[in-house]
Amino acid sequence: MRRIFLHRIKPIFYHLGFLLLGLVVGISILPLILAGEIYDYQDTVDGVHLPDVDALVCLAGGRGRIAAAGDLWYRYWEHDQHEKPAKTPPYLYISGMGPGSTWKALGKQLRTGVRDVIRPENVIMETESQNTEANAYWLATYAKKYGWSRILLVTSRYHMKRAQLIFERTLKHEGLKVDVDTLTAFQEPFEPNEWRSSLHGIHVTIQEYLKWVYYKYLWKDA
């Protein structure tokens, strides 16, 4: 009797095992399919026509971000020199540079032409924050201090969607009316058609996608 029972029950376990395996594989693959959503957005600035802003806010941490923000600041500086009288360019605000960061260390990440004209009074180096939430909190603190009403956020493409969400919600929570424009810094392989081309691109994109889902649906910006 026992043999008959085991003989009949064994196929059920096999089917359940395959079903469970399929479920695990499906759950594992789903983020890979959906993760590209974080690249599905449009910058508010086209890179040609630059709006008047109080600060260029660069989120340090991604390779090439600071150099890209420095180049952008230089374009503002160059344009403002032709104004009569010459205007003061927006602050170059570097968020999350890390404790112990120095003017010399910043200079090494800027291109030669930018280093030739930029001065310490043009730059704010925020060294306290270590994640995007803290980036936004400290930016709100400086925006309140200096009375900023419009910023241009610069970060990597994979990071921008979540960063913009966090910054806008944090500024609103702090009672500040600050417009957040966006312009992404190019960083390989984090482009819509490239991120699946390397394990690093897949890992970072999926990780960022899971964070995006959390901040979009579950995060309470209290």
Image (cartoon, rainbow, N blue to C red):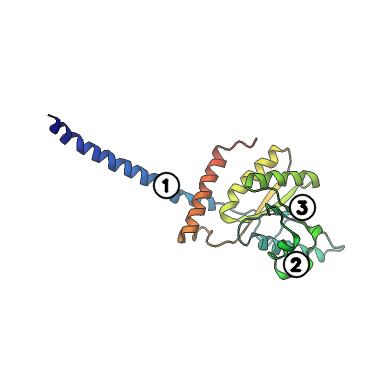
Where is mark 2, residue-wise?
115
Residue 31 lies, in percent from the top left, at 45, 48
Sequence-first disc among 3 and 1: 1
Residue 103 lies, in percent from the top left, at 75, 60
The residue located at (28%, 41%) in the rendering is: 17
- The residue nearer to you, when weighing 158 against 14, is 14
Sequence-first disc among 2 and 3: 3
- Going by the image, does 59 lie left or right of 216? right
Q: Residue furthest right?
A: 85
Label 1 vs label 2: CA separation?
45 Å
Q: Secondary structure at mark 3?
A: loop
Q: Residue furthest top?
A: 1
Would residue 65 be visible to someone looking at this image?
A: yes
Label 2 vs label 3: CA separation?
20 Å
Q: Secondary structure at mark 1?
A: helix
Where is mark 3, residue-wise?
54
Residue 219 lies, in percent from the top left, at 58, 38
The crowding category of the residue bearing disc 1, from other C-alpha atoms within 10 Å (few below 14, some 14 to 19, many at least 20), is: few
Where is mark 1, residue-wise?
30
* Tag nearer the camera, 1 or 2: 2
Q: Secondary structure at mark 2?
A: helix
Q: Are marks 1 and 2 in contact (CB under 8 Å)?
A: no
* Tag nearer the camera, 3 or 1: 1
Q: Amino acid at mark 3?
A: Asp
Above or below 70: residue 10: above
* Tag nearer the camera, 2 or 3: 2
The crowding category of the residue bearing disc 2, from other C-alpha atoms within 10 Å (few below 14, some 14 to 19, many at least 20), is: some
Label 3 vs label 1: CA separation?
41 Å
Q: Amino acid at mark 2?
A: Arg
- The residue nearer to you, when weighing 3 against 79, is 3
- The residue nearer to you, when weighing 197 against 84, is 197
Residue 91 lies, in percent from the top left, at 77, 56
